[in-house]
Amino acid sequence: MVHVRTKIERASPESVEVLSRHSVATIHEAQGRLGALNSRIKPVDRAMSVCGPAFTVKCAPRDNIMLQVAIAYAKPGDVIVVSAGEYEEAGSFGDVLANACLAKGIAGVVTDTGVRDSADLIKLGLPVFSLSLCVKGTVKETLGQINADVIVGGELIRPGDVIRGDADGVVVVRREQADAVAVKSKEREEAEAGYIAAYKAGKSVIEVSNLAAVLAAKGLTTDE
């Protein structure tokens, strides 16, 4: 017997909203270069962006029965995160299930397997991040866990952790660290804005990044 776990602790809507203002790259750097999923997991369309608590599901490769169960029980604003064995040669999600997600207010889908109907997914606008695009169909046979800890893209993702995805990829933030990471992300963006302003004012990247002493210590010389 497989029990469907529906009650999970989610990051607060306020934390999710603040993190949504920052890019995946900024969040990854702000939390100590942690949490980035494998770079092969990319959005179906570069314009897609998502931020929300993870609603996790374990599926057998080439089988999407539990993905459909997850869609049935996920809450508005959730990001469904699918662990399916990093199997590229299956299109386990497409326009029909995307419409089911949109009807429920699900924020997006992240999967370590393939999806299909990509043109329709782009038109629908549901943020979908996948390992591949593949037309090959799936079966509905094997039960799996809902809202268990999963490994997707080489990262541990727990139910309720914050998933942030944009054109560059996907990053996970631990739900209990969301507020602190949001603060650090804001600080990083402010620092980077200062660097850009300094470049525009005529300073070199070596000056702005305080690299002169580091480069000299490593033996870098110039003919100036």
Image (cartoon, rainbow, N blue to C red):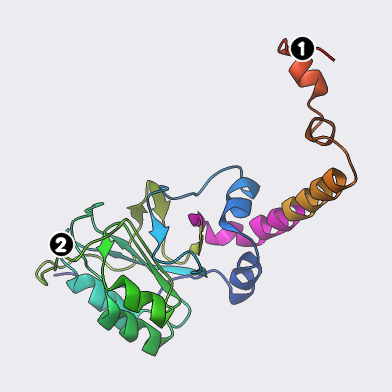
The quarter in which the N terminus is drawn is: bottom left
**Is-magenta flag for residue 105?**
no
Q: x, y percentage for residue 222?
A: 78, 14
Residue occupying image coordinates x 50% and y 49%:
35
From this viewpoint, which residue is outermost toward the bottom?
103
Residue occupying image coordinates x 64% and y 62%:
22
In which quadrant of the rendered view does residue 21 lie?
bottom right
Q: Report whether residue 37 is seen.
A: yes
In this rendering, position of residue 54 left or right of residue 15: left
Q: x, y percentage for residue 16?
A: 59, 70
Residue occupying image coordinates x 85% and y 50%:
197
Above or below, comparing residue 104 to residue 29 in the picture? below
- Between 92 and 150, the one lying in front of the other is 92
In the image, which disc is placed on residue 221? 1
Q: What residue range appears in magenta?
A: 168-187
Q: x, y percentage for residue 61?
A: 17, 58
Residue occupying image coordinates x 15% and y 62%:
62
- Between 47 and 102, the one lying in front of the other is 47
Indicate the amino acid at tag 1: Thr
Q: CA distance from mark 2 to mark 1?
A: 57 Å
Q: Report whether residue 6 is seen.
A: no
Element type where label 2 sits in the image? loop
**From the viewer's perspective, is the residue at label 2 or at label 1 nearer?**
1
In the image, which disc is placed on residue 62? 2
From this viewpoint, which residue is outermost toward the right?
201
Q: x, y percentage for residue 57?
A: 29, 66
Q: How many marks?
A: 2
Majority secondary structure of the magenta segment?
Answer: helix
Indicate the amino acid at tag 2: Arg
